[in-house]
Image (tube, rainbow, N blue to C red):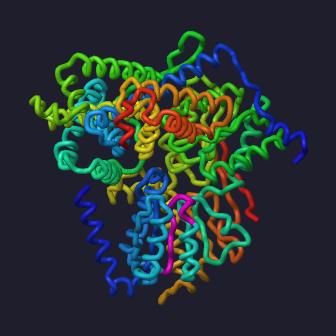
């Protein structure tokens, strides 16, 4: 561990040298590499780092290396501001990447706008500014999408449920999660579902049983949770310990694949926009081999999100050409189509007005107790993003 | 949206009082109170002896849980051995924290010692990420412990690890109270807490007493951390759970073990009942509302020592 850290520090010092910066695409990331929500962001950042190291090892982009500078903000807005200022003013990055909680967005956006540097959200939730009509400097590769996710999830529940749906919701007490569950709560009656309860659970909570007790007591036969993984899975586990036997569906975060295998719960569904590694695509093997070679701490199943960000950054820098500038890169990103090679249901396509993607695809998985494996319950379903 | 739909969404849920749910609520209160009490007694032990508020207690608790992860890989299928080793390591950690850090603060302003614990907490949080990474961990899985649910009379349910947590809290409090009342070192600890000068003049080794208090405090916190981790997993948020138990210690009185127990019960009952009958969001603020109410009415807490806290 110490040797790895020392090597990383030396590499960072070498990369930060002025000569290197002048002869490379310099991009910078502020992310929650430590702190309470780091489990959601750190694996994606690690994947991005490995991806770009591979690109550099293969000769770089347009004959130039990519110099990725990582800054930890511990999901604190104050630190993210300082990081953004440093990356722009001191390091002269042409692309700023945010991989952190949404509370860090506002200061980073302000710094990026002031300097005219494009800002990519990778692994953190996509802000509304990337949807049509998009802000010219903000872009997003993250899988999850407010409102679209709830629409897709409720449509799946309606299609799957065999009895009238009495639905409960579970959110974390953070603005984004609450807003999404509020949205789902409003949509559900229109689909013939009865809303019986909505639990807003503060982070962190030592015991989820009191919240689960209320959901169970309300008579829910389906529960939908769109929140950080810890809230989603601990609510489910508390419900099961109370003897609740209903169906539970949650967003397929990075941890989902490992957790489906851990829980082995046939009525636990995860819905998401990334293909799970159980699909065994060639690119999954590529990611797993790269993770193994780099000796990363995180399982390869948690690396798809960062890998996709890497693919998009590579394509954007390639389209920018050399010499590169922030303005040229922003222009290139405004018209980009990247084949995700099966990691998503379709390409990530950005247009002048849409910096999220023109179509959002969803897949649903669960654990099959008979087969003893994760199975695909519903294949890619597309939603147009307008 | 149609008016009827809006009413369907926003009409308040009927309040149920079936025997089953009342029993379940009683179990939920007992489990949450046990968590808070087990954590809070660590604050009390250090404060009672040295008047230092250990703000790194949450991090030390988290470190204890990660130590279980460490020992779990050594004793993969022997859970008792893994827990015993992690408990031993936690006790040692507490003693070492005193010997190599807090001992230097002896005789300094209490505020300096408190700030030192803040720095220790930050250091531990960073070190834990570097060593164990930020991802979610499940010690129960590594130790092959199945956390099944036990069905109690009245139909209430409790998980095996939560039941163990309740039993551990009872055992820890029983042992600590007996130790402080009848044990030679326990009596010395009380003496050092009441008057360090007189205790030292009677030949009591104050450094040994303080080191023991830090060791026991870390051990009890670590036990709480390990049992929570076995029940529901382990991540970086555990340190903040340590802070959530702080109001329980203050409500009961920072220098009273019985007070910590009663404070934990009050805070847990308020939290669970408000989650169920009013609004789940209140669970975040309730401990602090109870604390403010107590500070207004009785600033030294239910069982605290008045003269000491009056000076504060």
- Residue A103 highlighted magenta (yes or no): yes
Left or right of residue B40, residue B269 in this image: right
- Residue A128 highlighted magenta (yes or no): no
| Observer-nearest of A361 and B140 | B140
Which residue does the image show at 31% across and 37% down from the upper left?
B47
Q: Would you place residue A327 above or below residue A184 in this image?
A: below
Report the magenta residues as a range.
Answer: A94-105
| Observer-nearest of A249 and B127 | B127
| Observer-nearest of B81 and B310 | B310
Which residue does the image show at 64% across and 35% down from the upper left?
A248
Q: Position of residue A48 (x, y in %)?
A: 45, 64
Q: Quadrant of residue B59?
A: top left
Q: Quadrant of residue A135?
A: bottom right
Residue A232 appears anywhere in the view: no
- Report the residue that reaches farthest toward the bottom: A323
Which residue does the image show at 54% across and 70% down from the upper left?
A108
Residue B6 appears anywhere in the view: yes
Left or right of residue A15, residue A110 in this image: right
- Report the residue that reaches farthest toward the right: B3
Q: Would you place residue A97 above or below residue A298 in this image?
A: below
Q: Position of residue B290 (x, y in %)?
A: 54, 35
């Amino acid at each position: 561990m110490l040797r790895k850290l020392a090597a990383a520090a030396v590499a960072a010092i070498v990369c930060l040298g002025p000569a290197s910066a002048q002869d490379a695409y310099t991009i910078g990331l502020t992310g929650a590499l430590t702190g309470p929500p780091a489990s959601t962001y750190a694996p994606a950042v690690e994947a991005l780092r490995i991806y770009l190291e591979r690109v550099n090892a293969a000769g770089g982009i347009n004959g130039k290396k990519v110099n990725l500078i990582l800054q930890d903000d511990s999901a604190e807005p104050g630190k993210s501001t300082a990081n953004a200022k440093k990356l722009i003013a001191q390091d002269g990055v042409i692309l700023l990447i945010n991989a952190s909680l949404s509370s860090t967005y506002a200061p980073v956006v302000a710094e990026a706008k002031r300097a005219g540097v494009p800002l990519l959200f990778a692994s953190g939730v996509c802000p509304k500014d990337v949807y049509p009509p998009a802000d010219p400097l903000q872009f997003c590769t993250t899988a999850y999408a407010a409102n679209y996710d709830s629409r897709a999830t409720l449509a799946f529940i309606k299609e799957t449920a065999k009895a009238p749906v009495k639905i409960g919701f579970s959110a974390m007490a953070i603005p984004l999660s609450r807003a999404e569950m509020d949205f789902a709560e409003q949509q559900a009656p229109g689909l013939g579902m009865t809303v019986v309860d909505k639990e807003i659970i503060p982070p962190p909570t030592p015991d989820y049983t009191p919240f689960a007790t209320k959901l169970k007591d309300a008579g829910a036969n389906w529960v939908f949770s769109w929140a950080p993984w810890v809230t989603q899975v601990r609510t489910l586990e508390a419900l099961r310990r109370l003897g609740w036997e209903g169906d539970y569906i949650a967003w397929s975060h990075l941890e989902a694949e490992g957790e489906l295998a851990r829980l082995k719960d046939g009525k636990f569904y995860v819905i998401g926009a990334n293909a799970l590694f159980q699909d065994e695509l060639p690119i999954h093997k590529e990611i797993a081999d790269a993770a193994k070679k780099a000796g990363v701490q995180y399982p390869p199943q948690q690396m798809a999100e960062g890998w996709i960000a890497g693919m998009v950054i590579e394509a954007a820098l390639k389209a920018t050409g050399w010499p590169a500038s922030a303005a040229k890169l922003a222009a290139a990103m405004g018209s980009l189509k990247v084949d995700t090679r099966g990691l998503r249901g379709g390409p990530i396509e950005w247009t002048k007005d849409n910096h999220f993607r023109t179509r959002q695809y969803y897949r649903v998985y669960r654990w099959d107790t008979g087969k003893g494996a994760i199975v695909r319950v519903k294949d890619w379903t597309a939603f147009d993003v307008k | 949206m149609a008016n009827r739909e809006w009413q369907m969404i926003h009409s308040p849920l009927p309040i149920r009082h079936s025997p089953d749910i009342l029993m379940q609520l009683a179990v939920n209160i007992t489990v949450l109170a046990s968590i808070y009490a087990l954590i809070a007694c660590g604050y009390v032990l250090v404060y009672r002896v040295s008047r230092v508020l250990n703000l790194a207690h949450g991090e030390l608790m988290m470190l204890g849980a990660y130590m279980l992860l460490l020992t779990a890989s050594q004793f993969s299928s022997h859970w008792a051995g893994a827990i015993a080793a992690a408990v031993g390591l936690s006790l040692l950690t507490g003693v070492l924290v005193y010997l190599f850090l807090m001992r230097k603060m002896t005789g300094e302003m209490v505020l300096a010692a408190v700030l030192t614990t803040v720095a220790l907490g930050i250091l531990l949080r960073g070190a834990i990420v570097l060593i164990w990474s930020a991802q979610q961990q499940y010690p129960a899985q590594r130790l092959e412990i199945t956390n099944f649910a036990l069905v109690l009379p009245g139909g209430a349910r409790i998980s095996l690890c939560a039941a163990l947590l309740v039993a551990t809290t009872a055992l820890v409090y029983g042992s600590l109270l007996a130790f402080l009342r009848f044990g030679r070192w326990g009596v010395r600890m009380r003496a050092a807490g009441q008057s360090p000068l007189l205790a030292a003049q009677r030949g009591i080794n104050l450094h040994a007493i303080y080191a023991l208090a830090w060791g026991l405090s870390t051990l009890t916190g670590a036990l709480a951390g390990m049992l929570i981790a076995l029940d529901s997993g382990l991540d970086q948020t555990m340190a903040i759970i340590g802070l959530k138990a702080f109001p329980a210690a203050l409500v009961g009185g920072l220098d009273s073990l019985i007070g910590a127990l009663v404070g934990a019960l009050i805070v847990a009952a308020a939290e669970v009942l408000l989650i169920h009958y009013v609004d789940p969001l209140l669970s975040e603020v309730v401990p602090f509302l109870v604390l403010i109410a107590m500070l207004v009415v009785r600033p030294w807490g239910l069982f605290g020592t008045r003269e000491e806290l009056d000076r504060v």
